[in-house]
Image (spheres, rainbow, N blue to C red):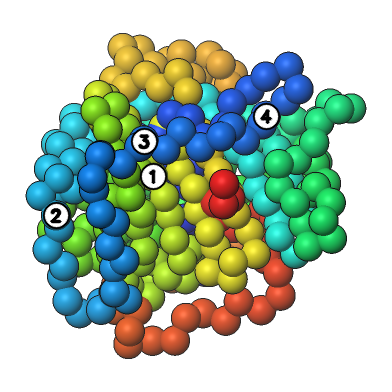
Amino acid sequence: MNAPQLWSAKFLGLALAAALPGMMHLSGSGIREATAQVPPAPAGEVRLQRPAPNPMVVEELPEDLLKIMQDWEYNSARIQTLTGKHSRIVYNVVFETERRSTGQFFYEQPDQGRIDMKGVEPTRDAVSRRIGASGKPFRIEADKQERWICTGQEVLQINDTEKTYEIYPLPPNMQGQNIINGPLPFLFGMKVDEARRRFSLTLLAANDKLAKIEVIPRLQMDANNYKRAEIMLDLKSFLPSAVKLIDPAGTLETVYVFTDLQPNQAGIRAAMANLWGRDPFKPALNGYKMVQVAPKVDAELVPAGNQQPAPSGNAPRQSSNMAPPRN
């Protein structure tokens, strides 16, 4: 996996700092996937299927979706810092497992962020909502304890369970304000015109509180990381509250849900340093073993139609891909 691909896959939750409220929730029995809170379609609305996207053609957006995207762009540009809590479920449809974790995240403009994840042990009576090919519910497991930290120049993947870490340098075209060139730019307030060039966007449903937007990559760089994303956007705060991703192979489905989102909170960096015991972007790694240093790789924006998708190979590791569950 190259650096840009890994950056998007594992660092998604951090990038999603501007995102969604409620496809999962915490309860006494652990994290449970809630019934999708999809806004009802307006009365009389007819849903039309979109044709397969042509990466060289920029589609005109319907007026309602265009207005949402413009408002999202405007509000995202005002976010300098963002912190909050998250819960995550990763479904592996090959091994029929459901891995659960929770944690906190911190994002700071233009390109620094951190997300901490801790596995959640299932209660004795917990039952997965996902049913496998065998007709039995997926096996619920606690995910590993890990941290993902983006310093602006590199991404550190820290496995606290195994006491190891990996370093993935970011190429210059993905540093600073160029973070919009990354695999998930729509989470960083990408300009509407750029979003239309790189993604096929569909407004699946909306009401006065929430909008559900489907995102399909047009460019090979994005298609290598996920084949489809769904974003639940809070239309009051214009912060996504939940994100669902499906990986290119269709074998991993990941849902992130964000709560207690606090944009531009005064003194938040000092508070995060106090929470984590030091500078959030300079973790203490004494006693940890470095297992990999990846070479720098340029993330070129190449139309997906001009290249073949990256081979999926065997089922990807749970920890290195993001993908959303089907409700």
Please identify the quadrant where the N terminus is shown. bottom right
- Which mark is on residue 31? 4
Residue furthest right in the image: 124
Q: Circle 1: is it few (<14), some (14-19), or many (20+) Cα within 10 Å?
A: many
Residue 69 sits in which quadrant? top left
Q: Earlier in the sequence, mark 2 or mark 3?
A: 3
Q: Is disc 4 in contact with disc 1, using a CB cutoff of under 8 Å? A: no
Number of the front mark, 2 or 1: 2
User: What amino acid is labelled 1 in the image?
Assistant: Ile
Camera-nearest label, 2 or 4: 2
Relative horizontal placement of residue 235, taking residue 8 as reference (left or right): left
**Image location (x, y in percent) of residue 150:** 46, 44
Rendered image: mark on residue 231: 1
| Up-down relation of residue 314 to residue 179 (above or below) | below
- Callout 2 amino acid: Pro
Residue holding disc 3 = 39
Marks 2 and 3 sit apart, C-alpha to C-alpha, by 18 Å
Instruction: Name the foreground residue: 206 vs 142.
Output: 206
Residue 172 seen in this snapshot: no
Which comes sooner in the sequence, label 2 or label 1? 2
- Label 3 crowd bin: few (<14), some (14–19), many (20+), radius 10 Å: some
Point out the frontmost of discs 4 and 3: 3
Cβ atoms at labels 1 and 3 below 8 Å apart = no
Residue 195 point in image, percent of width and height: 22, 58
Q: Are marks 2 and 4 in contact (CB under 8 Å)?
A: no
At 43% from the left and 55% from the top, the residue drawn is: 229
In the rendered structure, the answer to whether residue 222 lies left or right of residue 278 reads left
